[in-house]
Amino acid sequence: MKSPTLAYYRDLMLVLLAKEFKVRYKNTLLGYAWSLVHPLLFAGVFFLVFRVLMRVETEAPYVLFLITALFPWQWFANSVNAANFFFLANSSLIKKVRFPREFLVFAGVLNDLVHFVISIPVIVVFLLWFGYRPSVHWVWQVPVLVAVQFFITQGLALIVATSNLFFRDLERLTGIFMLLWFYLTPVIYPRGLLVEKGCTWMLYANPMASLIVCWREVFLNGTLPPLMLGAAAGFGLVTFLVGRALYRSLEWRFAEIV
Amino acid sequence: MSEDVVIRLENVTKSYRLGSVAKAGVKDLVLHLPTHLRERRRQRLFEALRDVSFEVARGECLGIIGRNGSGKSTTLGLIAGVLRPSAGRIETHGRICPLLELGAGFHFELTGTENIVLNGILLGMTRREIDERMAEIVAFSGLGDFVHRPVRVYSAGMVARLGFAVAVHLDPDILLVDEVLAVGDLAFQGKCLERMEGFRASGTTMVFVSHSLGDVERICDRVAFLDAGRLLDLGEPRTVISAYKDHLRRRNLRERS
């Protein structure tokens, strides 16, 4: 049997990614703008609550402080939440056709990654507005963090997408779980708050906490704290391998249960 | 495996676990954990196929007939490689393409051409192969300018034509056809059958599952008759089909008395 070539996998990935993209933008005039409006609206709400009403003190202007962490978080959260449907939405194909199903998850995660990347200019505009300058080190720092976050996200998305086939109410739990995770991660409040309360371990025990701290350091100061990066990368590798192992061990049963 | 055999099933058994926790959900699992554990131990297995063996030669068309739940689709799933046998061995040689239920794998927000690319790639074609055949596929579908409009605005018949157009241009070594002819009007069914005869003439191996015994007799070289997961008969179409009809008649009589 002719085994699929690398070119086939590349094509498969591109076609699935293009599909995700087109489906999202069909029938929406706002298109690109819409994908920015959504995170900005969130940012607006958090700004109102945490800066204006609760007066959280941060080292940088709160808007900057917020969006440098919120935008990467949304890539992660959107992918994991959507992962519930990556396999389920293609059940008729899974039942009949043998193709590498993990590419459905891959394309979904890449789609959200692309949306994150195209939101980086918005971060830059805000930085410039407040008198910050983008750093030349971003050239390698941003790709490194994108890679680490990709591994965490893809791993978790594989776990969620696979498990949801076996436990169909997982989607509800995922939503609640992600919300909880969001509040346990220093996105809307500074990590100093965790350190102050003697919860420094929470920064290292939570893969997204160390990663979010890295993103913020990169965008605001052009520095990448090595310890935090190491923690995030370690988590990324483990999550990815666990997700892949779970997918591999259950994939042969997909057609039976979808 | 000899050169000429492209599909071989050897003592294949496929069983499913009945009453699996799947679909019940996490909540159900947690709330009824003790029951689940107890039941898991004495869970019965449902045998969809039992000890089935047959071979399909290159260029041959095998029909599979049997009542609902006799294991026909399971057999196709096993050949397609989406299901794994519980026991026994399966060997296949060449590119296998299942003819999907019409419209399966289409995205209704995408246009006809976009769906051709999507469907083609999921069925194993590379981008280049699809692009090379695009004009041909569009022409075969007879959709005209509609291929540039979202599938959402298509009639059911148009969706069927698009799906069939993609499938028949896949150039498979082995084509799996599962009762797709049931949908679509008579003209369309006629076109499908014509195309399948074309496939047969060009030496494509086919496995054809259908309840339409006339079509089976017309297209197939040999027919397998499955009942309750067992291969009851395999051979010349006319003989096997009449054996199947006898079986149905006896069964009906038994049920009536």
Image: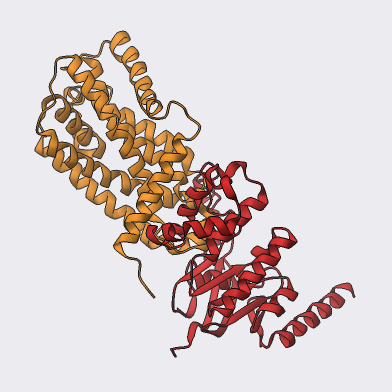
Chain colours: A orange, B red
Residue furthest to the bottom in view is B2
Q: Is residue A103 above or below residue B253?
A: above
Relative horizontal placement of residue A85, taking residue A14 as reference (left or right): right
Residue A24, quarter of the rendered image: top left
Dividing the image into 4 quarters, which one contains the N terminus of chain B? bottom left
Asked if residue B252 lies left or right of residue B177, the reply is right
Residue farthest to the right, as pictured: B257
Q: Quadrant of residue A179?
A: top left
Horizontal placement of A59 versus B251: left or right? Answer: left
Query: Residue B39 at what x, y percent from top left?
Result: 56, 61
Instruction: Name the one closer to the observer, B197 or A19.
Output: B197
Q: Tell me if residue A159 can be seen.
A: no
Residue B174 visible at all: yes
Name the one closer to the observer, A211 or B139: B139
In this rendered view, identify the residue nearer to me: B17 or A97.
A97
Query: What percent of the width, then of the height, locates residue A75?
Result: 32, 35
Which quarter shows the C terminus of chain B? bottom right
For the point 36% across and 61% down, the residue is A248
Nearest the viewer among B71 and B160 is: B160
Q: Is residue B120 above or below residue A84?
A: below
Residue B195 point in image, percent of width and height:
61, 70
Q: Is residue A144 above or below residue B212?
A: above
Q: Residue at x 61, y 72 (%)?
A: B196
Q: Number of labelled discs?
A: 0
